[in-house]
Amino acid sequence: MSAVISIVLTLVMLVLLQAVLGFDNLLYISIESKRVDADKQPFVRRAGIGLAIILRIALLFVVLKAVQHFEEPFFSYHSQNVFEIDINVHALIVLVGGIFIIYTAMKEIMHMLTIHDLGHEHDGKAKRSVPAAVTWIVIMNLVFSFDSILSAMAITDNVWVMAGAIVISGVMMIFLADHVSEFLQKNRAYEVLGLFILFIVGVMLVSEGGDKAHLSFFTHKIHAMEKSTFYFVLVILVLVDIVQSRYQKKLAAERAAGPQHA
């Protein structure tokens, strides 16, 4: 009986871990799905996450069998006091994923600044095909899941518990993805907050990849951003956005009431 309780508690812990680490993934899925026609967006989100669940489980078994190979450097370069790197598969995946997320966030932010009519922001904008959007969602889902799988391995060695957590968290993501996208669509002001959160996620991944690759420039080593620092930054971003929104509403109300008091 105690063994069953232990397994259930571990499963709950892993599901919560996947949920916390999957928040930034939901933001990316929402942004990527917007690039296809509106009537196909729910299908893109569900298909992308569904395929990612299957590939996550496959990745779990691959990592379990070959985790040592992911950590062994396959390329090293040392130019004393200038540039040093010992790149491995894990570091490469995290670095490339982080750079791509930063690029995606910055591109969307620049697009917001250049559009003149928010009601027609997608007019003339190149849309992604459904297969391409699903493919990118799957790829980035795997990038996000890599660290969560390694974190799960540190908690338990029961592969079926880890696989169960992946499936449960994946089903939760399918359910939440549509709600996140609908919320951002109805509350357009929060899109900026979401994009900057995604940008910080990219920075965190790049720092983590650089740390794993022992990357250094002019004797200055790249260190991984602490998770506590990451969540602190997120809290500050959210608080600033809330205060800014309320202050803008107050200013708008005062402007609207101004002529009446004159």
Image (cartoon, rainbow, N blue to C red):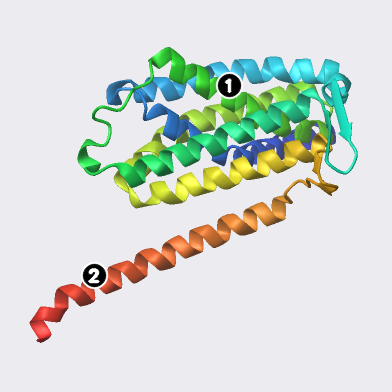
**Spatial separation of the CA atoms under disc 2 and disc 1:** 43 Å
Q: Position of residue 70 (x, y in %)?
A: 82, 22
Q: Residue at the far bottom: name it.
A: 262
Residue at 40 percent across and 27 percent down: it is 33
Q: Is residue 140 left or right of residue 179?
A: right
* Residue occupied by mark 1: 139
Residue 234: % across, % down = 57, 55
Residue 246, above or below 137: below
User: Residue 90 got which mark?
Assistant: none
Disc number for residue 252? 2
Circle 1 SS class: helix
Q: Would residue 70 be visible to someone looking at this image?
A: yes
Residue 129 appears at what percent x and percent y?
38, 15
Tell me which amino acid carries mark 1: Ile
Horizontally, is 157 left or right of 30 in the view? right
Q: Quadrant of residue 130?
A: top left
Q: Is 55 rendered above or below residue 114?
A: above
